[in-house]
Image (spheres, rainbow, N blue to C red):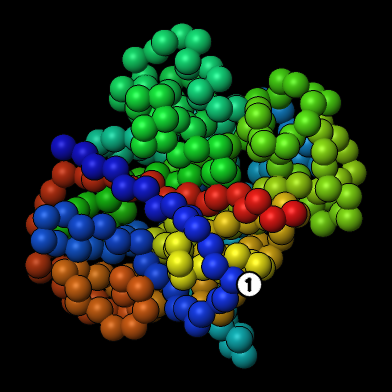
Amino acid sequence: MSARAIAAALALLAAWPAQAYKRSCATNGKLTVCFYWPDPSAVTWKVNPVRGGSSPSCDAAAGADPAVQAAQAAFAAWEGATRAGEGAPCAHLSLPFGGTTSTAIAQTGMGTSSEHLVVFRKGWCSDVAAAHADPCWATASCNNTFDCFDDEGPGGGQGGLGKSVLAITTVIYNPNSGAIQDADLEVADWSGAGAGTSIVGASDGWYFTCGSDSTLGQTCATYGQASCGYEDLQNTLTHEAGHFIGLAHPCDGKACPGTSSPDVTMYPTAPPKEIQKRTLAADDVEGVCAIYTAAGPVQEISGKKSGGGCGAGGDGGLGALLLAGAALLQRVLLHRSSRA
């Protein structure tokens, strides 16, 4: 059988308490496991670069694709995680770029894929699948059926993600060990329709900008607008790549501030034109380096832990305790903050 768990940002408060990193974990019966790639020597991922529409700053031209480059920079940030004052990365993790692919099927249930994907969904599923009265809603597969972002979910809104979500990472993992078997990133991208219309409310997906445009003083107001910044693609993908390797949000709900976003890549929301998640904060570095050590990836099972979250550090010698098991599924996401 399969299971779905969604980590979401909730109501925010004004003060940022001291927080450590957290690992992404799940409970299967009485057993709690935290996620990790069992062979971190070469976790290859690919991008499907096909997009319904994009800002001029993210358009591919002359053989260069800024959106693909943003994804490469996002994964490279985690691969090169280095503690302050140290000259070499402390994370023993390799995330090579496997190139582009035509595959656009993200895992939403049992099974694994030979490709770990970054895909750009074209608008909201509620705008596409509703017109078809498609049975995909009952199986939570509209994203793969129509290449859209699943904002509603089964039942026309019951258990859906909502239109505040910028991107989501789906992880298939072994419920007895936490070993990741597959992971895919989906971006809630613009469909390409409605150029020149207002982007307020993200009525046709989110408007992402790339490179220096994301930091420009002018905030984009319409789909297709140039020389302005809105939701930074690299900022979003760096956060999602953190979920891809097994990290969770350091805070949710009452533990999160509302006045300003702290300098932590795994913080659960992002305001327009934010780029600080492109660069890992100290807590982010400690998280990836605690999981992927020189001795191998650290497992966390049934509460055996020391440190922050579901486990900073832990007992790496638990392999003899593991049993083969069916894959379960968890989905982790980044919300767009309403702050301008």
Question: What secondary structure is found at the residue carrying circle 1?
Answer: loop
Residue found 56% across the figure and 31% down from its top: 121
Residue found 29% across the figure and 43% down from its top: 4
- State whether residue 312 appears in this view: yes
> How far across and how far down the image is residue 17, in percent?
51, 80
Quadrant occupied by the C terminus? bottom right
Q: Relative to 20, is 102 on the left or the right? A: right
- The foreground one among 216 and 56 is 216
Number of numbered discs present?
Answer: 1
Image quadrant assignment for residue 298: bottom left
> How far across and how far down the image is residue 122, in percent?
60, 27
- Please give the residue where the numbered disc 1 appears in the rendered image: 263
> How far across and how far down the image is residue 28, in percent?
16, 54
Quadrant occupied by the N terminus? top left
Image quadrant assignment for residue 245: bottom left
- The foreground one among 11 and 148 is 11
Q: For label 1, count other residues whose C-alpha is less than 10 Å away and answer few (under 14), some (14-19) or many (20+).
A: some
Image quadrant assignment for residue 292: bottom left
